Amino acid sequence: MNLFNTASAKNLQTTHLINQHTVHAAPVLALPPEDKTSLFRRSIQHNYADLLKIADDSDMAIGLTDHQGTLLWTWSSSAMLSSAEQVHFIEGGHWSTQAVGTNAIGMALNSQISSCVYSHENQMDSVRDWVCYAAPIWDPTSGQFHGIINLSTKYKKHTPLGLLAVERCADLIQRAIKFEQQNFLYIKALGSPWVQFNGQTLNLSHRQIEILCILALNPHGIGLEELHYALYGERSVSLKTLKAELSQLRSLLPHSIEARIYRLSCEVQCDFLRAEQSLNANLISSTFSLYKGSFLSKSESPLLSTWRHCFDARLSQLIYQIKDIDQLLRIIGQTHDRIDAVQRLLELLPQDSIHRNYFSNLI
């Protein structure tokens, strides 16, 4: 059984995270085919004409990224087209701060608030005649972070209304996300678990959430007996009990769970798989923006327990590679269960730091 669903992340490798001082264009990543019909992509298409008009009227380039900073869609006015193509402000261009240094997309991605980066503030020399405005896009129902919308133009055309304009664009997309939520399942399993279907929070048992997570980890389907073992292991629980759980789930998620070979047939997004995708790409900020706590910490499912332990081990390995004290402080502030982050912080703090005693007491 494949414990990790990494197909969607196979094009995100750490080889593109290079010394920003030598970068003149963003790395370009191949987008997985499933992104073409995703909820987020449909929401972009829903507002295509309005977004294009905003960019065209202002002689700007406009782009929307996924939650990692990879551009899913762009359009450039004639004034920006050539330079946008040269720096890879194009579909597939990856604009995290790890990849290209300080830039508006990366700053908004890290802080998840609106950002303006002006001219010389850009770390990449090739965009130092640009001014860029970026805003995060959230699911108005679940609060899920989808990505960043960015408006860019030449610095001579900087306007104090730039941030308002990009936030207006973000609002358009967020409204479209709510409109497009049909047959859409969102599973949150990091920290306190809950599930939404078509924008409505479902009242599910912990066991039912476990089943949905197992199905999400097996997108091509799983047989009944294999599902039974993945969920219960050697525990003496009958197949009839599992069938009853599945029957109830299918009634709560109509036309969304195929039988015999059990598979989720609706559109699915999971915080833990998105976090894994970011972890695969070694994108620290993106990973910890999704990580809200341990994956189904109460689960005794053999499959889910193994996934949890493997993910935690990889996360810990990433933490011990961090050399930035501020980044560790942000992680500790966001996630109170990561003792490894505190231990790593103590390794980096000067011996005479006034903060050592406080953080030592957290262990």
Image: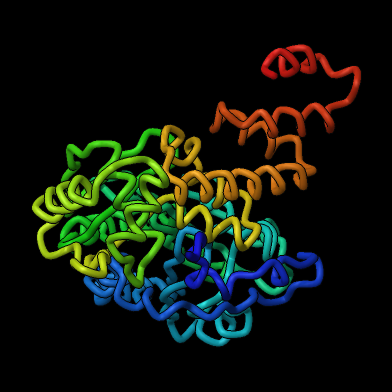
User: What residue appears at the point 53 percent right and 81 percent down from the top-left corner?
Assistant: 30
Residue 204 versus residue 129 in the image, above or below: above
User: What residue appears at the point 66 percent right and 28 percent down from the top-left corner?
Assistant: 339
Query: Where residue 7 appears, x then y in whole percent?
Result: 50, 72
| Count of numbered tags | 0
Instruction: Work out whether residue 230 or residue 144 is closer to the camera in this orientation and state it.
Output: 230
Residue 116 versus residue 81 in the image, above or below: above
Instruction: Work out whether residue 223 or residue 125 is closer to the camera in this orientation and state it.
Output: 223
User: What residue appears at the point 36 percent right and 60 percent down from the top-left corner?
Assistant: 226
User: What residue appears at the point 52 percent right and 77 percent down from the top-left corner?
Assistant: 92
Instruction: Work out whether residue 159 or residue 25 is closer to the camera in this orientation and state it.
Output: 25
Query: Where residue 52 appears, x then y in whole percent?
Result: 32, 76
Q: Is residue 363 left or right of residue 80?
A: right
Query: Where residue 259 appears, x then y in whole percent?
Result: 18, 66
Q: Is residue 48 left or right of residue 281?
A: left
Q: How is the image coloured?
A: rainbow
Based on the displayed image, in which of its 4 quarters is residue 261 positioned?
bottom left
Based on the displayed image, in which of its 4 quarters is residue 345 positioned?
top right
Query: Where residue 351 appears, x then y in whole percent?
Result: 90, 21
Residue 122 versus residue 337 in the image, above or below: below
Q: Is residue 13 left or right of residue 242?
A: right
Q: Quadrant of the C terminus?
A: top right
